[in-house]
Image (cartoon, rainbow, N blue to C red):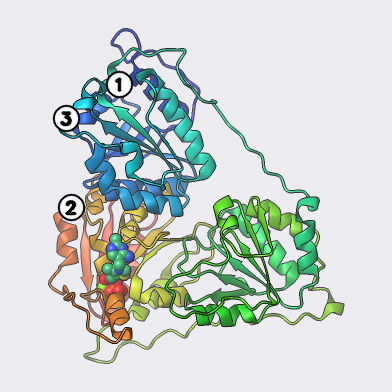
Amino acid sequence: MSESAPTAAVQEGEGRGAPTVRDAALDVMRRYGLTRIFGNPGSTEINFLTDLPADIEFVLGLHEGAVVGIATGYAIARGRPAFVNLHTAPGLGNAGNAIANARDARAPLVIVVGQQDRRQLAFEPFLTGRHLDRLAGEYPVWTNLPARPQDVPGAIARAYHEAQAAMGPALVVVPMGDWLEPADELAADSPLRASAPHSVSPHDVAELAELLAGARAPALVVGAEDSHEAWDGVVALAERLRCPVWQEPFIRRAGFPQDHELFAGHIGWRRQVMHDVLAEHDVVVAVGTNAFRLYLFDQPLRLVEAQTRVAVITADPAEAYRSPCELAIVAPVAETCRALAGLVPDRRAPERRTPAPQSFQRPAALAPPAAGEPLRPGHVLDALAERMREDSVIVEETPSSQPELYRRIRIRAPLGFVGTANGGLGFGLSGAIGLAMGLPKRPVIAVLGDGASIYSIQALWSAARYRVGVLLIVMANGGYSVMDALAREHGGQAPWPRFESVDISALARAFGCPAVRVETHEELGAALADALGRLPGADQPLVLEVTVGE
Ligand SMILES: Cc1ncc(C[n+]2csc(CCOP(=O)(O)OP(=O)(O)O)c2C)c(N)n1
Ligand SMILES: [Mg+2]
């Protein structure tokens, strides 16, 4: 599947006389390379979607959570906005959490939401969306109901720039009659190309450089910046500082190469654990994230001691301003780290005798299960770690075995790890499909809980229909293991049952997606070798359902 690059080509109407708003909108979409529509259709979008021109492709998802999840993966893969069509309140409502996740995942999306006709909106007809521009709440980076039909194409253009600039979903509500109105060349419009240069001078980072220069035991805690440039910048800074680099909890993206000797491991989310890790250091810099990414308030503990000095480097102003710290630099991570690396003293210099920090120690591979014992998640992860290519993209949504995945799988390439950014299950399966669509030259492998896989299971149909060669490994333990553990830890019984009877492979096949179930160590090795041998480039998805003990 290919999608045309952005062009400034302006085409005349689609053959029906004077150009309509729809014609102008399609031209805007071509202009920005938004020629693939991820969507689920409804009556309020018929005017827009019927008889799409040949260069505009429609990719169907069978539920809006799946649609936006796939589009999110695709946008992350390509680093530029993907286009989504949703059907008024039902479509936008169903997509709610996927939009929230796209925001946290920094995925640029242009989302067009259909609406009833302006001429009868006042009567609230069937399928009216009440204040559709508010239904997604605070999650879109920009929301617009165009002032008049003629401003729809310009609003889509603006949404493209807003999504790209803020790296999140931008939403345009389009009443259905608008598409057929005559276009107006005097209507709203946006730049053909926009550029927002962000160079960082030594002067901009002098204060932080000074802080780091005086540090006895500095450390970096990295977040979600995983471009080649960001990795190079953080590596250069860490090497000058000769300091440990920790990955924050609940990884969205891997912020540092995990085979680097300075990689110290993943900070556990428990406040005591975080505190103890940070307490070793007198200066801690959060890079590409806020200080610090939290989960449950399990203990009323401060995360850093009063004498620990904390700084933040992030391009996201909100991340910076919600961080209690001494100094926050709101600027791109790559450029900031490179500028800092040029200023801080080189602690590798022999006379400084800075001891090398402890590298992350990975656990040894598990011995195969004894006769009659089930496979454990660690077996699956070992088998994957042993065979996966360095440039693989691992998509993680496997709640109870997440810590084990962090320990056993090494991420060695930029954009080598994509996690569910806001914790809402359903992105893993759908997002992996979009990532594989957008990264046809890299193996894309999702590791999913069985429960997690069901939240957007319909996306398997899209993977099969559009021949997306993604590998989806499902840890089938027959229940919500992590929730059961939390209930036990809370000292009580979980009221929810287990669901061993759900047959994930059968569900996959019902959606047209090939599936293999694996129960033994031998089957696991053989099935994984076979599946990975086909990646990248497979022309169909595969679900590998592995029966695992808890
Ligand atoms: C949309 C959504 N609903 C509910 C939850 C709460 N939740 C977190 S983990 C989990 C269970 C996951 O089960 P499974 O994927 O089978 O993983 P396991 O714990 O068994 O490894 C649930 C329900 C959530 N994170 N997202
Ligand atoms: Mg499970």
Query: Is the CB–ligand 1 distance for label 1 below 8 Å?
Result: no
Instruction: Residue at the far right: name it.
Output: 351
Look at label 1 and name its amino acid.
Answer: Trp
In which quadrant of this rendering is ligand 1 seen?
Answer: bottom left
Left of 363 or right of it: where is 93?
A: left
| Residue 21, horizontal then vertical, whole percent | 35, 18
Q: Earlier in the sequence, mark 3 or mark 2?
A: 3
Left or right: 544 with respect to 329? Answer: left
Residue under label 1: 179
Residue shown at 16%/76% (left/top)? Answer: 497
Q: Quick one: label 3, few (<14), some, or many (20+) residues within 10 Å?
A: few
Quadrant location, the N terminus: top left
x and y percentages locating residue 422 in the rendered image = 40, 59
Which residue of the protein is positioned furthest toward the top in this rendering? 17
Verify CB contact (< 8 Å) between mark 1 and mark 3.
Answer: no
- The secondary structure type at the circle numbered 2 is loop
Q: Name the residue under label 2.
A: 512
Whether residue 237 is visible here, answered yes or no, is yes
Horizontal side of residue 64 vs 255, given as left or right: left
Closer mark to the observer between disc 1 and disc 3: 3
* Distance in Å between CA atoms under marks 1 and 3: 19 Å
Q: Which of 140 and 501 is in front in this view?
A: 140
- Number of residues whose C-alpha sits closer than 10 Å to that of mark 1, classed few (under 14), some (14–19) or many (20 or more): many
Nearer to us in this view, 205 or 39: 205
| Residue 142 position (above or below residue 225) | above
Give left or right: position of 253 versus 283. left
Q: Where is residue 386 in the image (x, y as percent from the top left)?
A: 43, 74
Sequence-first disc among 2 and 1? 1
- Residue beneath disc 3: 125
Q: Distance between the residues labelled 3 and 2?
A: 37 Å
